[in-house]
């Protein structure tokens, strides 16, 4: 059973371990060097909101929100992401983490969430669509990773 709670610095190593797969083995993240636990702890601290999903006391996924843009006019918008252990994909864990994150963002006064998705990624587009995100545009050939150019679709939803 998934338990969702606020992340702490003590979760940084587990979050870094989950994220490592996406950096090393996929184009889902455009980072090329996986952050270590110290860097992940700094990201948790700097985030707008960061939630972890635990099963039997072990972190199996996380979702977070960060600034969409540092300019004042964008202060009520944020960018969101969710990452799961590969075996947890398509189990409802991503949806549960996102729904809890959206509730937190509403409490904090946010009005709009955005998400960037490297294409192709039917699972992520499907998850975001199911949760009410709508496409707003695609940056073509915007990121170079694993010896190829990749498109990034942007989606948004009202909170």
Image: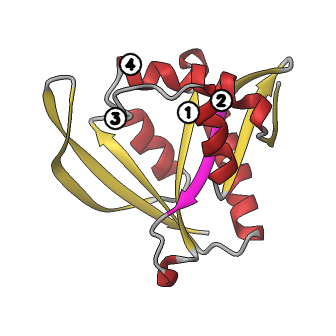
Q: Label 1 vs label 3: CA separation?
A: 14 Å
Q: Nearer the viewer, residue 1 or 8?
A: 8
Q: Label 1 vs label 4: CA separation?
A: 14 Å
Image point (51%, 65%), residue name: 157
Q: Which residue is mark 1?
A: 83
Q: Nearer the viewer, residue 55 or 69?
A: 69
x, y (%) of residue 159? 62, 69
Q: Does any portion of residue 123 appear in the rendered image? A: yes
- Alpha-carbon neighbours of circle 4 within 10 Å: few (<14), some, or many (≥20)? some
Q: Is residue 35 magenta?
A: no
Q: Secondary structure at mark 1?
A: strand
Image point (36%, 17%), residue name: 25
Magenta stretch mostly in which secondary structure? strand
2 or 3: mark nearer the eye: 2
Q: Earlier in the sequence, mark 2 or mark 1?
A: 2
Q: Earlier in the sequence, mark 2 or mark 3?
A: 2
Q: Which residue is mark 4?
A: 24
Q: Which residue is mark 2?
A: 61
Q: Label 3 vs label 4: CA separation?
A: 17 Å
Span colored in magenta:
61-67
Which numbered circle lies on residue 121?
Answer: 3
x, y (%) of residue 76? 58, 76
Q: Secondary structure at mark 4?
A: helix
Q: Secondary structure at mark 3?
A: loop
């Amino acid at each position: 059973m998934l338990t969702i709670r606020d992340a702490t610095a003590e979760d940084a190593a587990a979050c870094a371990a989950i994220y490592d797969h996406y950096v090393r083995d996929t184009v889902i993240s455009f980072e090329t060097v996986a952050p270590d636990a110290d860097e992940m702890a700094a990201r948790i601290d700097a985030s707008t909101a960061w939630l972890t999903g635990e099963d039997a006391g072990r972190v199996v996924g996380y979702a977070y929100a960060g600034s969409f843009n540092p300019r004042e006019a964008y202060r009520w918008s944020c960018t969101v992401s969710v990452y799961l252990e590969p075996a947890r994909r398509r189990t409802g864990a991503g949806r549960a983490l996102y729904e809890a994150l959206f509730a937190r963002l509403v409490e904090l006064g946010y009005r709009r969430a955005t998400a960037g998705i490297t294409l192709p990624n039917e699972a992520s587009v499907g998850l975001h669509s199911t949760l009410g995100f709508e496409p707003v545009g695609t940056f073509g050939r915007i990121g170079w990773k694993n010896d190829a150019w990749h498109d990034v679709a942007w989606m948004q939803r009202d909170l």
